[in-house]
């Protein structure tokens, strides 16, 4: 389904036969006939078929369509423990499914389940979490990866809310995919966090929303000034880190490049190895990869995942953040709630 119209490219279309199998398996697991998941995750109330389909379509129309395009539905039936129906966009029908409690929605062309039920989202985060008194949150990115930028924009409101309650930071994937400008920016951000961390959030907010020059380089200089960064101190740190981790040396020596195509960036190489980081973004909470547990890259979804990792949640966790996803790439716009939740920059 090429929707923006649902903002999904043809390369990720799910063939109808495969979708039926996927939905059937999801139904078996979700409805738990063999008690393989806790009782609290079983559906508590069955909706009428038409109401469940309408709930899914209302979500699509509110969150996943380009302006002026509207989806409709027809032929709702009960099948394999789900409600099945046809989702119609611009005269084309797509196979679609919704669980009978209206909690989960699947459709041809959408590569993962969409969570329609906020309570289920909270329970999902809680089930996935490893709990500690002070959660440790590491978000691995490439600074010019469109999806890494999206993750950083998701991260910032959560950092503002929980920075005094959790240990939170941005880290870097151990290779670059976006040229010299990326490794230079990675070094800048590494050093700002290391030596002027109280100014990093202000810098990052400006950088992720920045305009870019003709060569794609973000206009970062104004962000340094606006955040009050001590640039002499920053330059000293960058030079030292560059030398310590052989960043420029590795960039200039293509024999060291990953697959012969991607320069190494070894500032956080030890952590990349520890957490088996493959690409940008990768979200680690309490030493566990939480990337797949986020159904969207919204501040609220990340907040729920982190708050679920507290032994005792602080009052800040009662604050409701935006459920809108930031756009991919640079800029302050928001994206559709179902868009690019699984996208990333990686070699595989």
Image: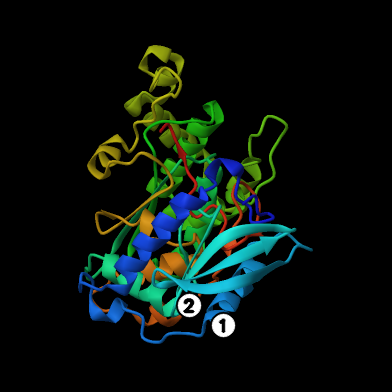
Q: CA distance from mark 1 to mark 2?
A: 8 Å
On the question of residue 132 being in view, the answer is yes
Q: Which residue is mark 2?
A: 102
Q: Closest to the observer: 240 or 176?
A: 176
- Residue 164 visible from this viewpoint: no
Q: Residue at x 66, y 40 (%)?
A: 219
Q: Is residue 36 above or below residue 94?
A: below
Which quadrant holds residue 169?
bottom left
Q: Dot 1 corresponds to which residue?
A: 51
Mark 1 lies on a secondary structure that is helix
Q: CB of mark 1 within 8 Å of CB of mark 2?
A: yes
**In this rendering, would 59 be left or right of 275?**
right
The quarter of the picture where residue 236 lies is top left
Q: Which one is nearer the viewer's eye here, 305 or 9?
A: 9
- Residue under the point 32% across and 38% down: 268
Count of numbered badges drawn on the protein: 2
Neighbor class of circle 1 (other Cα within 10 Å; few <14, some 14-19, many 20+) is: few
Q: Quadrant of residue 34?
A: bottom left
Name the residue: 49% across, 59% down. 297
Mark 2: secondary structure: loop
* Residue 207 x/y as whole percent: 59, 48
Placement of 173 over or under 287, stated as above or below: above
Is 169 placed above or below 231 here? below
Where's residue 143, x and y in %? 50, 41
> 78 or 108: which is nearer to us?
78
* Residue 262, horizontal then vertical, whole percent: 44, 24
Q: Is residue 129 above or below residue 147?
A: below
Callout 2: 10 Å neighbours few (<14), some, many (20+)? many
Q: Nearer the viewer, residue 214 or 5?
A: 5
N-terminal of the pair, mark 1 or mark 2, is 1
């Amino acid at each position: 389904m090429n929707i923006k119209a649902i903002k999904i490219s043809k390369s990720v279309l799910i063939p109808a036969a495969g979708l039926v199998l996927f939905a059937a398996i999801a139904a078996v697991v979700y409805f738990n006939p063999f008690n393989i998941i806790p009782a609290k995750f079983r559906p508590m109330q069955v909706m009428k078929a038409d109401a469940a389909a309408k709930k899914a379509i209302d979500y699509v129309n509110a969150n996943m369509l380009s302006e002026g395009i509207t989806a409709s539905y027809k032929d709702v039936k009960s099948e394999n423990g789900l409600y099945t129906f046809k989702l119609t966009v611009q005269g084309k029908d797509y196979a679609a499914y919704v669980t009978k409690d209206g909690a989960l929605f699947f459709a041809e062309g959408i590569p993962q389940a969409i969570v329609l039920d906020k309570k289920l989202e909270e329970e999902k985060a809680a089930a996935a979490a490893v709990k500690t008194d002070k959660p440790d949150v590491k978000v691995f990115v490439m600074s010019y990866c469109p999806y890494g930028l999206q993750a950083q924009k998701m991260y910032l409101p959560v950092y503002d809310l929980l920075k005094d309650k959790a240990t939170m930071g941005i880290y870097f994937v151990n290779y670059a995919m976006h040229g010299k400008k990326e490794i230079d920016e990675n070094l800048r951000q590494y050093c700002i966090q290391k030596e002027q961390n109280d100014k990093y959030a202000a810098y990052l907010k400006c950088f992720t929303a920045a305009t870019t020059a003709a060569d794609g380089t973000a206009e970062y200089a104004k962000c340094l000034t606006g955040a009050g960064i001590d640039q002499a101190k920053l330059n000293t740190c960058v030079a030292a880190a560059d030398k310590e981790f052989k960043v420029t040396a590795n960039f200039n020596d293509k024999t060291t490049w990953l697959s012969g195509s991607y320069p190494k960036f070894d500032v956080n190489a030890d952590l990349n190895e520890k957490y088996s980081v493959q690409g940008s973004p990768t979200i680690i909470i309490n030493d566990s990869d939480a990337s797949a547990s986020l159904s969207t890259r919204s501040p609220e979804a990340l907040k729920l995942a982190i708050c679920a990792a507290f032994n005792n949640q602080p009052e800040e966790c009662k604050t409701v953040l935006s459920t809108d996803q930031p756009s991919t790439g640079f800029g302050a716009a928001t994206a559709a709630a179902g868009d690019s939740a699984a996208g990333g920059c990686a070699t595989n």
